[in-house]
Structure formats: structure tokens, C-alpha cells
Amino acid sequence: MSEYILEMQHITKTFPGVKALNDVSLKLRPGTVHALMGENGAGKSTLMKCLFGIYTQDEGTIVLNGEPVTIPDSRTALDMGISMIHQELYPVLQRNVMENLWLGRFPVKRFGPLSFVDHKKMKEDTMKLFEEIDVDIDPEELAGHLSVSKLQSIEIAKAVSHKARIIVMDEPTSSLTSDEVEHLFKIINNLKAKGVAIIYISHKMEEILRIADEVTIMRDGNYIGTWPSEELTTDLIIKRMVGREMTQLFPEKTNTPGEELLRVEGLTSVRENSFKDVSFTLRKGEILGVGGLVGAQRTEVIEALFGLRHLAKGKIFLHGKEITIKSPRDAKKHRIALLTEERRATGIFPMLNIVDNNTMASMKKYRNKAGLLNDRLRELDTKDGVSSLRIKTPDTHTRIQSLSGGNQQKVLISRWLNTEPDILLLDEPTRGIDVGAKYEIYTIINRLASEGKSVIMISSEMAELLGMSDRIMVMSNGLMEGIIDASEATEERIMELATAGLV
């Protein structure tokens, strides 16, 4: 009997214009965590979609428990004990936990020709399942009331309920706090002890080195190699992922902040338990980093600057003159742009192509007097954006959902540059993006600041704040606790301010 529960042998997959996988192999032992790493576009997701029956490989063999298998669809994969927890969770928010867990397979009780959902058995089965993997969630709680980490726990429970022996986790910690990460790792260790094998996709090096037993690295659709995690370091992983040594994680700063461009005084939300009395300035050509822990209300503040949230009080001054922003249309009129935190939920239009996504925020300038769109000009502007931001795509009419996360993010940056903004509000601009693509995004941000654009950048990554910002504003529990010059900023000082409002 094979020592491997899964072997993916010489997998090749081609799409029009691109070879997504080229002779890729992966071997998985039971009761282990096997990390799958690579830059955005390396082919990780495509390989896993071949395993889960979403795609069918053009060449190669999938061997399960020593036997070659064909996986034509996800239903077959589940029946074979393979489950996949996607990065983006899509629960039915208006239904409760147990209904989400058993959706499509509710237990029923029959009365003659009639059948009814057996809610009592469904609750009992849910509680038994939660006890098995150490999850503490009320089965009757509405899914819409739960945190991301609890929704993720439900997905893990769902995988276990299918008797999964292989679980694929795609960026499972991208939206979790440190405490929630610890709970996830506890669940993973419980699953390992039961012999479940886990394929763990993540860009977070410290997590990989801590949780993984083995690491497979891919690059540009090719298999680079597999190593025991104890033989790897962060530097080695980066070198093998990008094919070169990255001695600099951040580009050299070339911007020079100038005169005051924006001033905010006493910004206070209409909502209770939100931000209050927030004041700061932003200079021309400056990158102002915004740090803080989850719940600090950073996103809420910049959404208010973009007209997405209502203010109880506060003043906004642009070029020294007071302005009113009550809607995104007002913000765009004052040449302010917003890159949202969740690109898949509130950024891209997945079913539309790159041209449509690129020009979505600036349709007015493409309309002629008859109200018709000038598609030739839209195409030209999109090609300019693809070229200047080095967006990797077969062509401009490719659906944006088929691009890697880093390239999707570049299209969104291009979209907002198309509106000719003076101020860019960037909310977690590199979330879920690999180290190589991050550097490209950093280079774009740095270049924009050098050209005189002003940037407010929210980041939960301490190194990113310290490496990119001219000044760092730190928020805690809705309050602005302080602004530190980058030359004087340290991780300790930032954390001290980030926790000040929690005492």
C-alpha cells in the first residue's frame, strides 16, 4: 500500500493563450499539513481545481489511496473524501448555522407520503460534529451574525461531515486575527491527529514554517520542488518562489512630501461604537500609513472620506478650502479614489472583462453626445493601464476572475488612476498577494507618490507600514492615538498606540 493518500502526477492544464500547469506533481501523506506556495499566477489554484473536479487536467494522473481516479466534478471529489475550503466564503447569511452546514442534504423524517426536515436530528448531528473538532458555535445562530473565523469553522465542519480525508485550505487566515489563527491551528492539529491530510495554501511565511510538515513550491505553472519545512527559511522560500533573491522587500523611496493637501478635523461617525474625533493631515506626494488592530475603525474612516459612511460632525479641507463629501460621486469630483479592502466582494466585477473593469469608474468620459460608449478609447486606455502597471493577461478581453490576485489588484489600481485622482485611499492593497506581486504594488504606490499623488494606505502588516510610509497614523477603538514620523517609528511604538484604546 502506498505511503501517500494522494499523488498528482505530471499534471498539465492549458487555457487559451496560457499554459497554467506544466508537468506538475504533488504527493500528500495522511495526517500531515502540506503547504502549497508560489506567487500569484503560479498555478496553485488551478492545480487544486483539477483535484476538486472544477477543471479536468489535459495530461497527467490523479492517484487516490494507490488507485488512479477520474474526478469529473466537485460532487465526485466530495464522495471520494476530498473537500476544499475556498478563500472567499459564501454562506447563506439569512439561514442559521446548521442549515448552512447541511445545505442540500437535510435529514428528513417521513409521515406516509410526506417528508419533513428533521430539525432535531440536524441540531444533534451539528453539535456532535462541533464537539468532534472542538468548535463552540450555537447551531441555531444566524450565519450573518458570525465572524469570518466562525464561518470558516463551519466550512471545516462541513468538510469533516463529508468524511473528508483530504482538505484543501486556500488562504485560510487572510482575514483572521492572531487569536483566531491560533484556534484554526488547534482545529488543524486535531484533524491531523485523526489522519486527515491538509493542503494549505498561504503567502504567510511564518505560518507555513510553523504549521506545515512539507512545502511544495510552484513558479509560473511549473513544479519547483518539495522540501520538509524544517529545511526551509523565509529567505529560501522567497528565492525559490520568485527565482531570484529578494534582498529588498520594499523599493527605495523616491517621493518628497510637499505642502498640505488634505486636512481632516474632528471626524465623527453617526454610528455609536465607531470612529470619533479623528484629525490628521495629508501632504502632496506623501504616503500616510494607517495602522491598528482589527476593530480600530480604520476602514470606516477612509470610507467616510469617500462618502460611503455618514458623519455626525467633522470638517474636511482640500487645498485649504472646506469641502463636503456625502457620496462617492462627491469624492470623485474632488479627485479622491478608493481601493477597497475586499477586492472580490467590493472591487472586481468577476464576470466582466478587463476593459469593463478598468473603465467602470470613469464611464462618463467615454460617452459621446448621443450617450454611446467609445469602445475604441476604452480599449486604448485599458491597454495603456495593462502596459504601465505590467498586468499579466492574455488580452484585455479576458474575464478578470481568471487573473491572479495580484493582477486583479493592478486592474483595480488602473481603474482608479483612470479617474485622474490626486488622493488615493488604499485599504489593505496587498492582502492575499504573494511577495513578488507585493513588490510590484509597492513600486506602483511609490511611483505615484513621486509623481505628486497623495496616498493613505491602511495595512495590517507592520513591515509594510514601516517600509512604505512617510508617516504612520495609529488608531485604536475608533480613536486616533497618534501620528509617528517613519524615521522614528518602531513596531513597539506602533503596538503601544494600537492597544492604547483597549485598556
Image (tube, grey):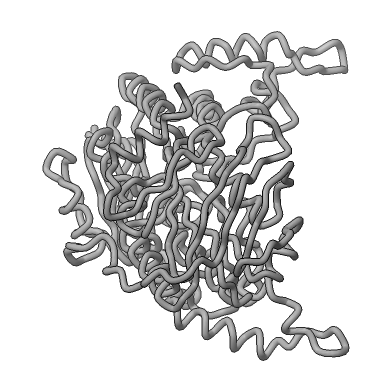
Q: How many dots with numbers?
A: 0
49 to the left or right of 300 = left
Instruction: Single out the residue that lies furthest toward the front.
Output: 320
- Looking at the rendered image, the quarter that the C terminus falls into is top left
- Looking at the rendered image, the quarter that the N terminus falls into is top left
Image: 184 above or below 435: above
Closer to the camera, 25 or 337?
Answer: 337
Which residue does the image show at 75% across and 58% down from the upper left?
Answer: 327
Which residue does the image show at 41% across and 30% down from the upper left?
Answer: 499
Image: 160 above or below 280: above
Q: Quadrant of residue 319?
A: bottom right
Which residue does the image show at 44% across and 57% down from the upper left?
Answer: 288
Q: Position of residue 353 (x, y in %)?
A: 62, 72
Q: Position of residue 58 (x, y in %)?
A: 43, 64
474 to the left or right of 382 = left
Q: Is residue 395 visible?
A: yes
Q: Quadrant of residue 141?
A: top right
Image: 316 above or below 279: below
Q: Quadrant of residue 199?
A: top left
Q: Position of residue 70 (x, y in %)?
A: 45, 48
Instruction: Single out the residue that lies furthest toward the left.
Output: 231
373 to the left or right of 34 = right
Q: Is residue 162 visible?
A: no
Q: Position of residue 366 (x, y in %)?
A: 73, 84
Closer to the camera, 393 or 25?
Answer: 393
Which residue does the image show at 63% across and 61% down from the upper left?
Answer: 317
